[in-house]
Amino acid sequence: MQLDHLTPDAAALDLQQHHGLNKILRFFDLGGTITPPSDDPQDWWEPENLTHRAKLLGICKSGNDDYAALLGWIAIAAKAPPHAGAPHAPVTLDTDSLNAAQRDR
């Protein structure tokens, strides 16, 4: 599976196979971002600016730390229905395609 056809459920299945820091690094490899809390007091009136936020494929989840936000993202993405035309069976991402896509950027 290539990155341009990545679905939330496939990304969640792939991330569940990794542990600890490797899970976070894989999330970044897939194009995800984890935003830390803002340290600007002017941003503190918005509750989401006081938490870490994991975002990928239009899904954003907050948590007390980056790992909690990522685990929350995985839980939500795993429950997402497969997109039309996407396989319903667990999919492993082709790391060669991922590495080639990273080089092409």
Image (spheres, grey):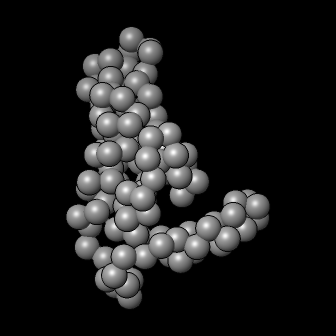
Q: Is residue 21 above or below residue 17?
A: above
Give the mark count: 0
Q: Is residue 85 above or below residue 50?
A: below
Residue 90 placement, left or right of 1:
left
Q: Which quadrant of the figure has residue 86?
A: bottom left
Q: Which quadrant of the figure has residue 80?
A: bottom left
Residue 66 in view: yes
52 or 10, nearer to the observer: 10
Q: Is residue 87 above or below residue 5?
A: below
49 or 86, nearer to the observer: 86
- Residue 89 in percent (x, y) is at 34, 82
- Residue 27 in percent (x, y) is at 49, 51
Residue depicted at x 54% and y 58%: 30
Q: Is residue 59 above or below residue 5?
A: above
Residue depicted at x 33% and y 50%: 73
53 or 20, nearer to the observer: 20
Residue 47 placement, left or right of 21:
left
